[in-house]
Image (cartoon, rainbow, N blue to C red):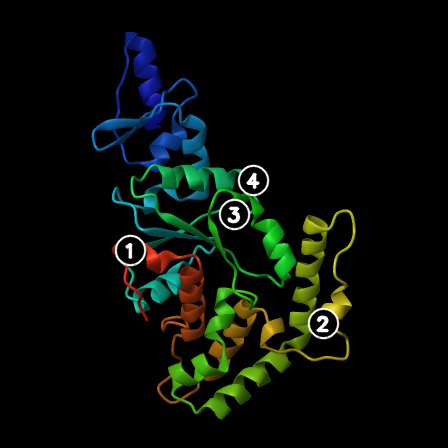
Amino acid sequence: MLAKTFDKLSELYGSTIVVTTHSRHLVAAASSTAKIVWMKDGKVESDECKDLANVLMDLGALDQLDSKGADCIVCTEDKGKKALENCVDALGLSEQIKVISYNGISNAASSIAIKAMADLYQNNPMIVIHRDRDFMTDDEVNIWGTDYRNREMVIFSPPLCDVETYHCTPAHVAKVYEFDQAQGQQIVQEEINRSADDFRTKFRKKRQEANQKFWKDGGSPNTNDLWPENEGANLARAYGKKLISNLNARLSGQAGGRRNLEAQVSDELMTLLRDCLEVAGFFNLENVEHAG
């Protein structure tokens, strides 16, 4: 309504209206005749960025960073970015690494927009793109990440299906509920077995999506080879969002009540993120000390 009012006032009085704002909503609502100028440190950063602004608005990334940027920006597809933020905090890197959530990992414009966003910061931050594995093979992750890697971004796609799965490992469950390792292993495997049919159905659906996206001309791996019919479910074949729900329901009756499996950092996920950063050379950057 405010954007429309500005248009009407401009037309009524034949005037130009100048608005300074941090509101993504006002920028998104601006009419096609509006000129968007990005300012940084009192200077014009870009005055030809209407399309870029809209893309970044769609990504939901523009208003998640302060003017200082970061040494490293981790872009995650998950709206719930807390799991990765916990990892960053546990590594002692919360001042150097910022985690933002974004939408549209399949959108070809995402890599362009995220790179353009990073270029707005003078310190040229490293960009790490995170997405859930969703039962993709390594080859498929490499194909998906091509546009990002071509723009010097780093791909982080841990091998388990999703972030939630890392909060369902026997070691993590045992840590949160103060079980011994054997008890944690037994509980997790029992809940995996209980939903094995659901996990296989989800696995097949995700594989169909991958085959259609990455292997339109054929040559895709056979789904039955990836998960043979005579083999049961395990953690690598589990759908974390379902498994964590199972575990929460089962463990709510424990002494002291249900504990939040996602509130504590996943040591395994944290290690994977640290290894990814190390391979990418993040710890060799100036003023960044190796953590963990």
Mark in the foreground, 3 or 1: 3
Can residue 252 be seen here? no
Secondary structure category for the residue under label 2: loop
Residue pointed to by mark 2: 227
Q: Which residue, as the protein is rendered here, is positioned at the far left?
A: 42
Give the quadrant of the N terminus.
top left
Instruction: Mark 4 or mark 3: name the one nearer the start of the chain.
Output: 4
Residue pointed to by mark 3: 149
Point 26% across, 24% down: residue: 19
Secondary structure category for the residue under label 3: helix
Q: Counting other residues with Cα less than 10 Å from the Cα at mark 1, is it few (<14), some (14-19), or many (20 or more)?
A: some
Residue pointed to by mark 1: 96
Q: Report the disc number at residue 251.
A: none
Name the residue type under label 2. Trp
Instruction: Mark 3 or mark 1: name the one nearer the start of the chain.
Output: 1
Mark in the foreground, 1 or 2: 1
